[in-house]
């Protein structure tokens, strides 16, 4: 089949002409080669109308769909980030359900579908990003669109019991089944989705591992997202001098996260606190630098986590700081990417300990930034999607404060030979399975490479 144009839909659209940052950069690079269309949300206005507004024209086009302030509240802050996000991160206790939120979400998804249906030509490939648009494919099919439609879900998948907390839980399998390809971060997510699909009696498993619903065949596969590893390594190696005030030989422990309750920051602070309480008084005096810029501050659960962390940080320094030593530094601002890369390279230990996380790109950025001859140690949660690939990290259970404290101690004292061995095992996972590999792999499957199509075709004959 012809490849046609690529139409990408994501909630956020790159603002500048040459965007930076993983996914945005990879899609930009791809569209710059092939042309295509990138659709995202416009800034909210008083009222919202159908259609797309073109905001940039070049090798590829960028266009926005309209969003009223009310819809922004219900579709984005409400259903997407107060319902789907906590639910998919196994935090049903944080759900706040409001029928208006779901109605707003459905309305915006339907508008996006109508806009795509208007511009998509036969042969175009439609690639939907993330949980903001779970219903778009369903609406596209209702409008008669038969194009290839792929969804990549950046966040983890809920299990069957989580899903029961979602009033629309029974409909989710049908929404997913409207795509041709559902891409997930890990095998664990593929298993979770396989269980969810079985909730819908109209969905059947095909002997080739695919799925079928009412004659429509689709696949669910894992495509672990990567980073621009070489680019990031180069940035790290040529980073400017760091504005860090600490002794050169003191260990630096680094955490970099969007401030989110899924990232396990409170448990991480607790683990560091326990490490400090147990450490040998004559031993090294590490600094733990946690960078965590605020996000989604209009959602109540995010204000709570921010207050909680501020209190914990104050208490930890209160208990352990000295005249010449501040063990914990908590920075809430966005950091320039070159400085960030330099910090990763300078860090002796990275603490990447989410309670639930689709992939976690920070883990991969840390590996990419290391000096291959004197690499730092990655402490990684079992619950980050990255743990499926980065088996050679020090894997921890972030809920176990004592084990976290032990891992910090072990990482600080790890001999060079073991660091080299672990890094050598981690490196290829990050450099070979990079962002370009991820993108090409997903699109090849979506557009149907010969083997995939043949395997699927065997089951479609009437
Ligand atoms: P996020 O939850 O945003 O992404 P993550 O994968 O860790 O999580 O990516 C965060 C990115 O922001 C990293 O590239 C990091 O360097 C950058 N960043 C964080 N703090 C920063 C700061 N203070 N200044 C500058 N940059 C900062 C979602 C899912 C993840 C999934 C990704 C990609 O939640 O699980 O890995 O999408 O699919």
Image (tube, grey):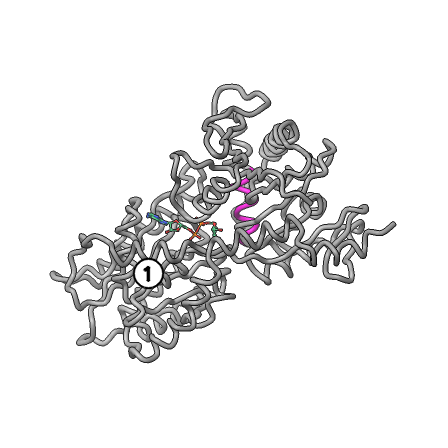
Residue at the farthest left position: 323
User: From where the camera sits, is residue 169 visible?
Assistant: yes
Q: Residue at x 22, y 58 (%)?
A: 318
Horizontal arrangement in the rendering, residue 291 relative to residue 43 (left or right): left
Q: Residue at x 25, y 63 (%)?
A: 252
The stretch drawn in magenta includes residue 411:
no
Task: Tell me the magenta residue range.
Answer: 79-90
How would you classify the magenta stretch by its main secondary structure?
helix
Per the image, the residue denoted by label 1 is 369
Q: Secondary structure at mark 1?
A: helix
Disc 1 within 8 angstroms of ligand 1 (CB): no
Horizontal arrangement in the rendering, residue 243 relative to residue 45 (left or right): left
Question: Where 77 sits versus 254, above or below?
Answer: above
User: From where the camera sits, is residue 107 visible?
Assistant: no
Which is more toward the observer, 122 or 172? 122
Q: Residues within 10 Å of mark 1 (few under 14, many from 20)?
A: many
Q: Position of residue 343 (x, y in %)?
A: 27, 57
Q: Position of residue 341 (x, y in %)?
A: 30, 55
């Amino acid at each position: 089949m012809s490849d046609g144009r690529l139409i990408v839909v994501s909630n956020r659209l790159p603002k500048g002409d040459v965007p930076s940052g993983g996914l945005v950069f990879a899609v930009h690079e791809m569209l710059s080669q092939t042309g295509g269309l990138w659709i995202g949300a416009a800034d909210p206005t008083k009222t919202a109308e159908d259609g797309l507004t073109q905001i940039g024209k070049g090798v590829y086009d960028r266009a926005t769909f309209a969003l009223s302030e009310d819809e922004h509240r219900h579709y984005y802050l409400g259903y997407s980030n107060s319902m789907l996000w906590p639910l998919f991160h196994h935090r049903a206790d944080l759900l706040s359900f409001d029928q208006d939120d779901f109605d707003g979400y459905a309305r915006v998804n339907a508008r996006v579908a109508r806009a795509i249906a208007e511009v998509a030509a036969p042969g175009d490939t439609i690639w939907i990003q993330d949980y903001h648009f779970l219903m778009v494919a369903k609406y596209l099919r209702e409008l008669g669109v038969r194009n290839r439609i792929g969804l990549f879900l950046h966040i983890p998948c809920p299990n069957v019991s989580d899903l029961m907390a979602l009033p629309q839980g029974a409909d989710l399998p049908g929404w997913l089944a409207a795509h041709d390809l559902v891409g997930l971060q890990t095998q664990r997510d593929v298993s979770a989705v396989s269980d969810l699909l079985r909730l819908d009696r109209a969905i059947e498993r095909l002997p080739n591992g695919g799925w079928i619903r009412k004659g429509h065949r689709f696949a669910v596969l894992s495509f672990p997202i990567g980073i621009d590893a070489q680019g990031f390594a180069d940035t790290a190696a040529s980073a400017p001098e760091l504005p860090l005030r600490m002794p050169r030989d003191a260990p630096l422990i680094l955490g970099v996260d969007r401030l989110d309750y899924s990232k396990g920051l409170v448990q991480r602070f607790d683990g560091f606190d326990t490490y400090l309480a147990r450490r040998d008084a004559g031993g090294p005096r590490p600094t733990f630098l946690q960078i965590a810029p605020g996000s989604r501050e209009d959602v109540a659960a995010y204000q709570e986590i921010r207050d909680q962390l501020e209190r914990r940080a104050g208490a930890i320094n209160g208990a352990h700081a000295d005249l010449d030593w501040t063990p914990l530094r908590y920075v809430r601002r966005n950091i320039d990417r070159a400085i960030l890369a330099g910090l990763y390279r300078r860090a002796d230990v990275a603490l990447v300990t989410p309670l639930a996380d689709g992939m976690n790109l920070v883990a991969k950025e840390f590996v990419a930034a290391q000096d291959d001859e004197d690499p730092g140690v990655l402490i990684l949660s079992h619950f980050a999607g990255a743990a499926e690939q980065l088996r050679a990290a020090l894997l921890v259970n972030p809920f176990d404060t004592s084990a976290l404290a032990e891992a910090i101690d072990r990482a600080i004292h790890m001999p060079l030979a073991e660091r080299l061995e672990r890094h050598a095992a981690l490196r290829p996972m990050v450099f070979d399975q990079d962002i370009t590999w991820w993108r090409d792999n997903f699109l090849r499957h979506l557009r149907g490479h010969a083997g995939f199509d043949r395997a699927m075709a065997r089951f479609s004959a009437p």
